[in-house]
Amino acid sequence: MHYFVNSNSHLGFVSYIDCNMPKDRFLLNSYPIPAVESIVKSIIAKAEEINTDIEVIHNCLNNSLEGVVLPQLHIGVINIPVYFEKNYCINYLDNEKSLADCKSNLEKAYSYLNDAIKVHDQWEKIYIENTDFNKLDKMTEEVCKIVVPKISLNKQSKIKDRFFGATTIKGAVDYCGEIINEIGNRYYIKGRPGSGKSTMLKKIINCAKETGTDIDVYHCAFDPKSIDMIVLKDFDTVVFDSTQPHEYFPDRESDNIIDIYKNAIAEGTDEKYENQLNNIVAKYRSDIALAVKYLNDANTNCDSLNNKYMERLDYKEFDKIRAVILDKCFCNSRTL
């Protein structure tokens, strides 16, 4: 499984590191990316040898490897990005211009993402004004009955917040397809911005909590207050927003479509507001493109930092550190 625990969003840098990492963890503090990837790849290779579950965490800026969790061994490794505002690492004492430039470019990217959310609000407003909320409420109630079994697992739900995608230097990237591929019961929500997809998912979460099932909650990378997907772990069920920029289509007979647009939005809304929607979408894409431009500039700054610290790296000492991490990660596997 692949996912992100951080996001560059319209709210700035948002992190869900804590709730995704086991209590037994290695926190790497601003390691250069090549060093991080070397450690993570070594862990993945060893985990594959012993056939234990692997969760791979990606960097939300450039999609590089940022960490790994071994759920069955109850341990994880994660690198804390050098630009994370709560990361008061020694790099700041260098008064390094590349770091200052990186943070400046990230702030510019966040500013354009914030402009994009305002445009997105206009996009949503059109569909909100054309939604029959009585129909939507009834639809959501029926979906909850279908998706969430009426049972009690006699335990309290454990919630993990994360992202299946990110706005990266390559634009929107997601691992939604890989996540849903491993799940038996799949529900694809189809709709439009503002049509109630996230609200429906939040209501399903509330229903599911009553059963005690563990839930993976995947937030929107662009707007983390919105939810794009939930996985009900104990029921082998996923319900997700299957619209752009993460649009997928059923490919199994058992797959189900929840079509909000068809069932709760006034017929012909797309056609009625076509010109207005085209203008909104064009402005939205323009703002996103500018944000991605500054994410690329920030990544270039990060590359400069990576190169600088890789030049200073004592490879013998690094090999010792990697060996210690590997030994700690797999010490529990000897008792499995």
Image: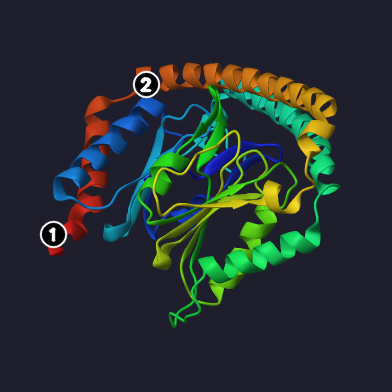
Left or right: residue 58 versus residue 34 is right
Residue 143 in the image: state x and y as whole percent.
59, 64
Judged from this view, the residue extending furthest toward the front is: 267
Q: Are marks 1 and 2 in contact (CB under 8 Å)?
A: no
Q: Residue at x 43, y 40 (%)?
A: 177
Q: Which residue is mark 2?
A: 310
**Quadrant location of the N terminus in the rendered image:** top left
What kind of element bears circle 1? helix
Residue at mark 1 to residue at mark 2: CA–CA distance: 34 Å
Name the residue at 70% across, 23% down: 285
Q: Amino acid at mark 2?
A: Met
State the residue in front, 93 or 97.
97
Q: Is residue 231 visible?
A: yes
Mark 1 = which residue? 334
Counting the numbered discs, the total is 2
Three-letter amino acid code at the position of disc 1: Arg
Residue at image point 21% right, 46% down? 47
Residue 43 horizontal/vertical position (percent): 25, 42
Camera-nearest residue between 258 and 298: 258
Name the front one of labels 1 and 2: 1
Left or right of residue 75, residue 91 in this image: right
Which of 248/320 is in front? 248
Number of residues whose C-alpha sits closer than 10 Å to that of mark 2, classed few (under 14), some (14–19) or many (20 or more)? some
Q: Earlier in the sequence, mark 1 or mark 2?
A: 2
Q: Residues within 10 Å of mark 1 (few under 14, many from 20)?
A: few
Q: Is residue 44 left or right of residue 224?
A: left
Q: Is residue 290 above or below residue 18?
A: above
